[in-house]
Image (cartoon, grey):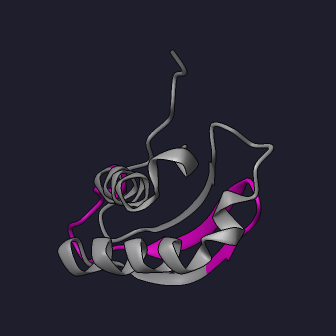
Amino acid sequence: MPNYRRNLVPGGLFCFSVARLERKRDLLVSRVDLVREMVRRARRLYPFDSVACVVLPDHVRCIWTLGDGDSDYPTRWRLINRLFAKGMPKHERW
């Protein structure tokens, strides 16, 4: 199991590079509409500001800021991943 370093600075600025497990498919760019909608849904439940976001064929890069006293970005990514997977037809899932 990877040993991730979690920089949990309340109200901080965070940079992410999140890769798909199956990197040879371009599912993220072919379904970018779904990616955008799932980020919007997650933002409604757990507010954050997206400073920048780039969707590439095999990964997503984002810069977010969280509210004062908030450092829980793992919950947001978990929710985005779960919503995206549920929104995909079974034959296209991760």
Q: Quadrant of residue 66?
A: bottom left
Q: Quadrant of residue 2?
A: top right
Point out residue 64 in the picture as x, y percentages from the top left corner. 48, 73
52 relative to 91, above or below: below
Horizontal side of residue 44 vs 25, given as left or right:
left
Q: Quadrant of the C terminus?
A: top right
Quick one: 59 or 46, which is closer to the camera? 59
Instruction: Identify the residue shown where x is 39% and y is 62%.
Output: 87
Residue 1 within the segment the image draws in magenta: no
Horizontal side of residue 1 vs 29, given as left or right:
left
The residue segment tinted magenta is 53-74
Q: Quadrant of residue 65?
A: bottom left
Point out residue 68 in the picture as x, y percentages from the top left corner. 24, 76
Count the labels in the image: 0
37 relative to 12, above or below: below
22 relative to 46, above or below: above
In the picture as drawn, the residue positioned furthest to the right comes out as 24
